[in-house]
Amino acid sequence: MPYFQSPVDGTRLHFVDYGPADGPVIVFVNGSYFDTGMWEFQTLPLADEGFRCVGLDRRGHGRSDDVWGGFDLDSLADDVDGLLRHLDLRDVTLVGHSVGAAEVVRCLTRHRGARVSGAALVGGVVPGVVRTADHAAGVDPAVVRAGNETVRRDPAAFFARGADAFFALGLPGNDLSPEYVRGAVDRCHGATARAGAALRELVATLDLAPELPKIDLPVLVVHGTHDTSAPLAPTGRRAAELLPDSTLKVYENAGHGLYATHADLLTADLREFARKRVSA
């Protein structure tokens, strides 16, 4: 059965495991609110090509258990590492989107990347969007928390009204059907209210700048020019500068949802990056 128990507290977590068991392994960590289905344009074609594509439903997301605790970054990273250990995965390319990128970073720094040979941060909120002592240009945490309160009061309106900006619809090349967009909005409701609130608070305090220089493996940073959830300069570009061994790929006109609007390009970049890890 595609479930395992969290090493943190025994929470039952759901995962998917596509492709041949002996293929090069790519593990996907989702953005806030989404389940593993968000990666369908990457996992299905890559699995068809012989990659083993594994995805985790974060606690409180998708088919994983609805729980109150364990939403601190250490616990979330331990859940990711727990999946790698449960399946005894080796030489993994670890891919995270949005807040999932933060989980990837903490997993690497907390567990020293023993099972991981490379990582990809896709539209990541890493190292953080809020103002800190070393990042004076960041957003005031109070402003982020005020926005979080607006979401809490009416999450349905937030998801529906934010879809255009999330996918940067209207910009050249970002052609998604209204049906796909509605489906993506509906998927957001698959996360529990507790999980959504906890992750929003996590983003309001996130500062991974001290951890990025400690990552001693190759990292692919993929980001869109029109990402309003995690603007390029303070996140993707800054992350690439702080990482010792990074490659930054900027997608023109892409928003936060570039895994859908720029699906083929992202799949190709992940394919190339993962294959280099195998041949290294």
Image: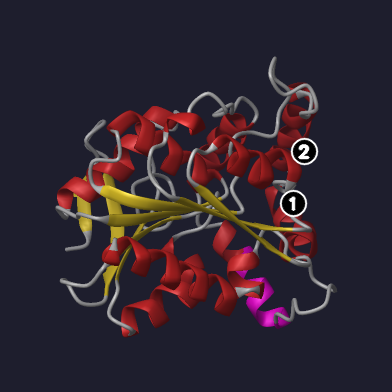
Is 49 inside the magenta-drawn segment? Answer: no
**x, y percentage for residue 202?**
56, 31
Q: Residue at x 50, y 46 (%)?
A: 101
Q: Is residue 182 visible?
A: yes
Is 183 inside the magenta-drawn segment? Answer: yes
Question: Which residue does the numbered mark 1 point to in the structure image?
Answer: 158
Quarter occupied by the N terminus: bottom left
Of residue 219 and residue 139, the one placed in the foreground of this image is: 219
Question: Which residue occupies the extreme top position in the image?
Answer: 133
Q: Which of the labelled discs sits on residue 150, or is there none?
A: 2
Q: Secondary structure at mark 2?
A: helix
Q: Is residue 125 visible?
A: no
Q: Which of the labelled discs sits on residue 222, or is there none?
A: none
**Magenta-highlighted residues:** 177-185
Q: Residues within 10 Å of mark 1 (few under 14, many from 20)?
A: some
Above or below, 117 against 17 in this view is above
Q: Earlier in the sequence, mark 2 or mark 1?
A: 2
Q: Residue at x 37, y 31 (%)?
A: 109
Labelled pair 2, 1 in contact (Cβ < 8 Å): yes
Q: Secondary structure at mark 1?
A: helix
Above or below, 270 against 69 in this view is below
Q: Quadrant of residue 266?
A: bottom right
* 157 sits left or right of 70 in the view: right
Residue type marked 1: Phe
**x, y percentage for residue 37?**
45, 68
